[in-house]
Image (tube, rainbow, N blue to C red):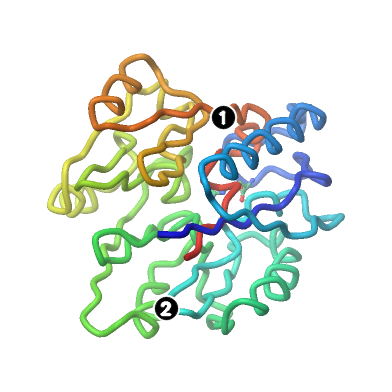
Amino acid sequence: MKMNITMCPPDYFGIDYEINPWMHKKNQPDIVLAKKQWENLKNIFKSIGVNVSELTPQKGCPDMVFVANAGLPINGKFILSNFAFKERMPEVKHFEKFFSEKFEIIKLPKDVKFEGQGDAFFAKGKLFLGYGFRSSKKAKDELKKHLKQGQDIVHLKLKNPNFYHLDTALAYIGDDNFLTVKGAFSEEAEKKLKKEGNIIYLSDDDAKNFAANCIVFERNIILNKASKNLKNTLKKLNFNVIESKTSEFIKSGGSVRCLSLVWQ
Ligand code: ARG
């Protein structure tokens, strides 16, 4: 199946504010290196046959590179994000303009916070939805209205502020396997997850290196960095492991998956 990824070049990327534990204004990204890393990731996507489109970056939107947070494509519609922090709100109108050319835009009520693919992905015919830090718990009821009848939501509460978006803590890699950050979820969420498939817990180092923030396309898995152990595990599962360094984006709390908005 064809896969589309929208990305946004890091022209205005920087740590202008601190809204997650990874961000420190004193620890600015090397912007030349950030651009190289971003281009490299884009070229990797293209080389494996992903269709990449680009958004125009905007001054005053340093986090716009993290396009995963633009919204969530659902059955031909696009649920536009409602950011939790005012710092990211200026991005919304640019996301709306871009995605309205491809999808029917759905806006959520103002009081319902939702950060798009940062907190939501489809797997196994279900919607996996995270909440606790950025997206509100009640986003579930709103999203349900746009799912196909009978389509389930696996609602997962996040509890570790370092893994504040679902896509930093969990990835479905196919064949019932999930990469998961230990301790990222509430006890109840952990129980729910275990019912959904086989949980592969990341080591602390792999978790900190954002291994859960990966993109899977066909037999390729693209991630910032994987330990020897994780590489072996993934190779045994028949994956071609592709490392694409994102050190500069991790300074802002994001990696491969956050830099990509995936749609069919
Ligand atoms: N600095 C950004 C923020 O805190 C990082 C967003 C990462 N995106 C993601 N999908 N996890 O909002």
Can you name the residue that lies furthest to the right here? 59
Q: Position of residue 150 (x, y in %)?
A: 21, 81
- Along the line of sight, which residue is nearer the eye, 216 or 207? 216
Can you name the residue that lies furthest to the left here? 195
Q: Position of residue 172 (x, y in %)?
A: 31, 48
Question: Cβ of disc 1 within 8 Å of ligand 1?
Answer: no
Q: Quadrant of the N terminus?
A: bottom left
Q: Is residue 16 left or right of residue 96?
A: right
Q: Position of residue 72 (x, y in %)?
A: 50, 68
Q: Which residue is mark 2?
A: 75
**Rendered view: 129 above or below 260:** below
Q: Earlier in the sequence, mark 2 or mark 1?
A: 2
Rendered residue at 50%/75% (across/down): 112
Rendered residue at 84%/55% (across/down): 60
Q: Which residue is mark 1?
A: 244
Q: Is residue 10 left or right of residue 240?
A: right
Alpha carbon separation for disc pair 2 and 1: 30 Å
Amino acid bearing label 2: Asn
- Along the line of sight, which residue is nearer the eye, 228 or 15? 228
SS state under label 1? loop
Q: Position of residue 216 (x, y in %)?
A: 41, 44
The part of the image, by quadrant, that contains residue 230 is: top left
Residue 209's label in the rendered image is none
Rendered residue at 65%/79% (across/down): 100
Amino acid bearing label 1: Ser
Tags 2 and 1 in contact by the CB under 8 Å rule? no
Q: Is residue 175 left or right of residue 231?
A: left
Other-residue count near label 2 (Cα within 10 Å), few / some / many at <14 / 14–19 / ≥20: few
Rendered residue at 31%/44% (across/down): 173
- Along the line of sight, which residue is nearer the eye, 260 or 70? 260
SS state under label 2? loop
Other-residue count near label 1 (Cα within 10 Å), few / some / many at <14 / 14–19 / ≥20: some
